[in-house]
Image (spheres, helix red, strand yellow):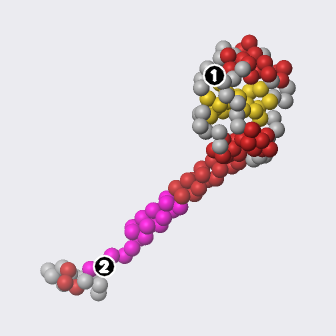
Amino acid sequence: MPLFDAPSRFVKKIREYDPRLRVIWSDKKGCWRVERRLRYPGFVNPAYFSDGDDRRSAQDGYMLVFTAGKEQLDDRVLLTLYVGDTWRRGGANRIADELEAKEQAAKDHQHNSFMDDNEYRAREYWKSINTVRTLDDKHRHERHNLSINT
């Protein structure tokens, strides 16, 4: 039996968010454990866990989502659940697709910037080597009375 029980007001909020969640106190670690009931509780063998809290949770058909400090059972827990909720965002595959699309867009942007920069440099170089340069008459060669402007 845990030393503390979660406040009923908080348990109600967390159950409204996801009815498969529970909050229990870990006497061993001195923190709250936010756990979620597994769809297939028999899928996880409790013998795989060396930690007593994790083994007990697996026996009950739950898995640890995260832990929270003694004074942290408030909206921060709900916010953390909301931000980390993969189903809310369409599942892990959709999130992976979004991340890959963002990564590809960043690579494309970097490649396009590199190519634009190269094109700009090439144009500037071409202009530089193909510009006719002339001197004014004060620089003409006096001995032969030559000027490139005449």
Left/right of residue 23 with respect to residue 142 in the rendered view: right
Evaluate whether residue 91 shows in this view.
no
Q: Is residue 45 visible?
A: yes
Residue at 85% x, 26% y is 40
The amino acid pointed to by label 2 is Thr
Q: Seen in the image, is 113 located left or right of residue 43?
A: left
Place of residue 16 in the rendered image (x, y in percent of width and height, measured from the top left): 80, 44
Tell me which corner region of the image, top left, top right, bottom left or bottom right, holds residue 38: top right
Q: Quadrant of the N terminus?
A: top right
Q: Is residue 127 magenta?
A: yes
Identify residue type, mark 1.
Answer: Asp
Residue 27 or 141: which is nearer the viewer?
27
Residue depicted at x 72% and y 15%: 48
Magenta stretch bounds: 116-135
Return the disc, 2 or 1, that comes first in the chain's sequence.
1
Which structural element holds mark 2? loop
Residue 149: in magenta span: no
For residue 68, the mark is none
Mark 1 neighbour density, 10 Å: few (under 14) some (14–19) many (20 or more): few
Residue under label 2 = 134
Work out whether 45 lies above or below 85.
Answer: above
Pointer 1 residue: 27
Q: Residue at x 63, y 22 (%)?
A: 27
**Callout 2: few (<14), some (14-19), or many (20+) C-alpha neighbours within 10 Å?**
few
Does 58 sit above or below residue 101? above
Secondary structure mostly seen in the magenta stretch: helix
